[in-house]
Image (tube, rainbow, N blue to C red):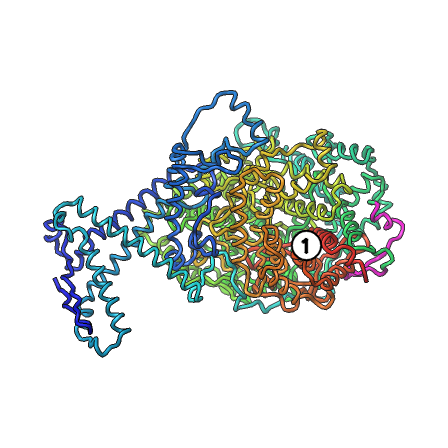
Amino acid sequence: MPSLPCLPIHDGTCVNFSTVQLSLPTPLKPIISNLPLPSCWELLFSPLCILGATLFVTSLLASHKLSRTPLSELGHVGARGRKHFSWNESTGGGGGIGGSFLDYWFYGGSVWIRVGQFLWDGMFGHADEEGEASDQNVGGENLFACFGVTKSSGSDDSSALNARERNETKPNTQQKRIGTGIIGYDSSLGSHGPLISALLRSSIMLLSWCSTISFMVRTHGEIKLYLTKVDTEASGVLYEAFLKGIVFLLQTIESILNAGESNQAHSDNCHGILFTTIIYASAYIALLEVTLFVLGKMFAFFRIYDPKGVSHPGGPRQHKILRIPKWTKDQQHTLPKELIQHEGSTWRCAVAHDAHNDTIEKFSGIASSDGDGKGGANVADFLTGEPFGRQIWTLEAKQCRNANEDTEDGLEGNLRKEFINASENSRTSQIEADYSDLIQELASGGRSPLAFDPSKNPNSCDQLFRAQMILSYLERNGGKLPKDIAYLQNHKQKSDDKGQTTSDSNAPKTVIEAAKRGIAFYSLLQTPDGHWAGDYGGPHFLLPGLVVAWYVMGCPSVMISPPQQALMLHYLKVHQQEDGGWGTHIESPSTMFGTVICYLAVRLLGAKHDEDWIVKGRDFIQKEGGAVMTSSWAKFWLCLVGCMEWTGHNSVPPEMWLLPNWFPFHPGRLWCHCRMVYLPMGYLYGSRFVYSNAESDPLIAKLREELYCQAYESIDWDKTRHLVAPMDNYSPIPTFMKFAQNCLSIYENWTFFRPIKNAMRKAGLEFCLEYMRAEDLQTNYIDIGPVNKALNMVSAFHAANHDINDVAVRSHMMRVPDYLWIAEDGMKMQGYNGSQCWDTSFAIQAVWECGMLDKFPLLSSKVWAYLERCQILSTETSRSSPAFKYESCDNRDKFYRHVSKGGWPFSTSAHGWPISDCTGEGLKGVLALMDSPIVMKAVKKGILKNIEPSRLYDAVNVILTLQNEDGGWATYENNRGFGWYEELNPSEVFGDIMIDYSYVECSMASMTALVEFHEKFPNHRTREIKFAIHRGKEFMKSIQREDGSWYGSWACCFCYGCWFGIEGLIKAGESPSSPAIQKCCEFLLSHQRENGGWGEDFTSCYDKDYAAHGMQSYGDGGSGVVNTAWALMALSAAKCKDVEAIKRGVKYLMKRQLDCGDWPQEGISGVFNRACGITYTAYRNVFPIWALGRCAATYGCVLDRD
């Protein structure tokens, strides 16, 4: 073996290198010496390398075993009420939730603190301020929980009998929140217990160290030669110090390499070698962890490497959107009367039990294929879930009213008797005739009745729905409007098309009067079950997916009727732009994604190929290179209907679901919306589903000609897989992902892989089908969103051998109306089954902050009833649905679902997916209503159902368990993946869709809900709540941008984000004078426009940069009422000292308010996935009311002075 000589140092001493022992442990020498291996391979059999490899393999085996045998019961890794000394948690770094490679090395060592904490809690436990045992049991009993094992214990009947009574008054200590334990695995978190993570990290360190040593041993000859030639006396003191460092490093390497041989007494003893090696390895790991941590701090301090978590949205995009949408000017599309009415019936919005009755009536005549022999008699059994919140459009007349107190009609009747002391007035057609002009004026939002001109504003203002609600209100109240706007019935005033009133004689004189007028108008629009409905459309790619599903399923009229077809065609026609294309959403410039899929839809709906507008659409597609240039999602629908070959689409292998759960990239770790879309995509791709009549259908043959620039048969489909038009390419597919897709193409097409592919594919398809069925039942066949709704429906159709009367297929079709909405621009598919709970929660908080809950008792009481019925899996009806059984631990683990019970949804309880911010806002809505004496009196009298404290505890549990490792809150689940997942984003048109990031909106809503809950229930999970708030505050600071703003991920955009950021910090205890708050206030004030308002449009979200011209296209002087309201709410929460700026903003809102109390519909408010806008028509009412109420409460009568 080579050796290093004595190295002289200038002071006369000599550092001697002993022989670098690469020899093997004595017991292994006879075995290895006979193998024909190079000498350097001996290192692979050194004790250190063997230890590292053993740890690595053991960790993987344990991961596999634990991921297939979940031991978790609920929620989080660790007791969330104790301090976690984690670097990444205090800085927002991504080490714990999937940051960069450097984050893993620098900050991942905090996992050892987790191990120690688990053991401490397990052996000793801890108590809260009440003196009661906290969520983990005290003492050694908790060691079971520490290792992920639930210790079963019997309970007598009396304890079970009294459990509910105790839960109403004390925290729910009967239910153990054990978590994954120290070695467990929780699929809802996508993570192991800390012990497995720590061992895996240690093995990676040891193997990396061995690799480094191997390299140095290979090159030590060169090092030796260099050192012997060094003139140390001429090199200076610094260089000498450097050489001493080299000497120390090589000596350390030598010591570790000789582990087990340095002590001659144990040289022939395997146990001695192992013991010594473990000592050296432990010392090395500890030293390296400390070194990495110190280096991380130094790098962060000197800004060499400043860690930012994966949830930091980053700065402005380099490639900004430059194209703008264009429509033919002054081309006003009035919704034809024959589309609104059909055979004497008028379209109306039915809600709750009324909606259920309509669906049951429609499907009652369909024969059943489930073999039960009952025909359509049991149709109601398949319409499961809580009816409250459901809203559908129907041509059927309302059924006889059901006065049962469990229905919306019974609720309304009881509340009217309580608060109005009058029975409901009879409904007569005379009211509609007498007040038709007034109703149109109130519903028009300052526009012409039922007119739509996208060149002025492509957003609808919900005239049809609002007119229906106003008529219903007048019918219920004998033709009388609320007293605050009753003057309109005697003094009608017209509004111009911009929404400006022609006279201000009736203008409110004070800020709070304007807010009250706004509430009075908005009360007209409340549905009988207590929620507010509205247009949640906007994206253009949703409706075409449903149309394709309808077409490949044989065009069942019960799914899309001829009147619906006509309304859908009208919608697509009026949104076509001047260049013939369609945008990805209503305010987007034309894209190939939007155009190809909308063109496909209009042709399938019956539009003729030679109509002028169809020819324009076809010309746009061919000018851009044909349908091969569209994005992957559009290509998928083309493949389903038979207008593209599957070889033209990149692989979506269903066998990915067969990977072990611990695998670094697993589909179960994806963001749920992404996961639930690619789940049915994988099933349909793996099944190679194609419309059964594709080869014989003349329309499909014609489309194959129209969509491409060359003959369909001549296209080399495999070469088109990566083609995408630049206008669609928001998130370009990275090189590695293209490489992976090419490898999958080989896997799909080469005969060599066929046997293994066929075997794995069958199992993958079976799991996908089982998972989709679970999703269908968990959501009562609504599904998480419109894309996977349509795909799941086609999958069920395929699994049923194309039987349209199959129970699952029929249940799917019964829920299609939940996604459809009609406005003055036609019928569209919404981005969800509505935004009911979200809008209602905000609305009641706005009324509360105006101090008017008891001034509108009917409104407030109906909201209480709605929120009570809307809490997920918390009512008798929801618990009797099939969804409830999927709340079990085994099912949640199997199907990657987080805990649902107790959360509030974005839309309805039947939808079944709780969201952190929706749960937070729903909880705050309930807590606000608890301040209303009138509501609480109605609860006490039994007119309203009580919401027991245990249900609020369930909501708090959902919020606490949804907090991410970085301290923030994601949407539906904890982040289970890693930042590098985004490098595998296959969608092209959307950004940041792969994992569930932490957002400022979700974090504020969750954190402030905990604050307000803690104020009313100070003894429930106190430590956990306080610590969660502290961590949330630190997270929100960590994602604040350099200019002081917060990027809003779910609305347009910085004004929205700043409201959430400031309010969250203030509620969490941050001083208004803190730098973070003041910097954000300065940002907002710097963007106030000359007219006093604030304005942004969709480009703020797309570009991640404040829109330079504000809401120039669809606002007023670049300002908009919604953005202005958000800015005012943020500034008033911070108690901004620039009162003049606040006054100007308030005056702008009052100036823009219409005489009736409404505000005009302006630009699009919402956004998702960075690149797609979505409509919230409720925002134009809710947020101006809220802002006026808050400003009035904060600044008082100062704002009323001229």
Range of magenta residues? 483-503
Residue 1067 lies in the magenta-colored region: no
Q: Which residue is drawn at 72% across and 67% down?
A: 1117
Q: Which residue is drawn at 17% across and 55% down?
A: 258
Q: Residues within 10 Å of mark 1 (few under 14, many from 20)?
A: many
Which residue is most to the top? 157
Camera-nearest residue between 1131 and 68: 1131
* Viewport quadrant of the C terminus: bottom right
Percent position of residue 614, x then y = 62, 60
Q: Mark 1 points at which residue?
A: 570
Q: In this view, does 266 lie above or below 990?
A: above
* Viewport quadrant of the N terminus: bottom left
* Amino acid residing under circle 1: His
User: Magenta: predominant secondary structure element?
Assistant: loop
Q: Is residue 1111 above or below residue 1158?
A: below
Which residue is most to the front? 11
Q: How many marks?
A: 1
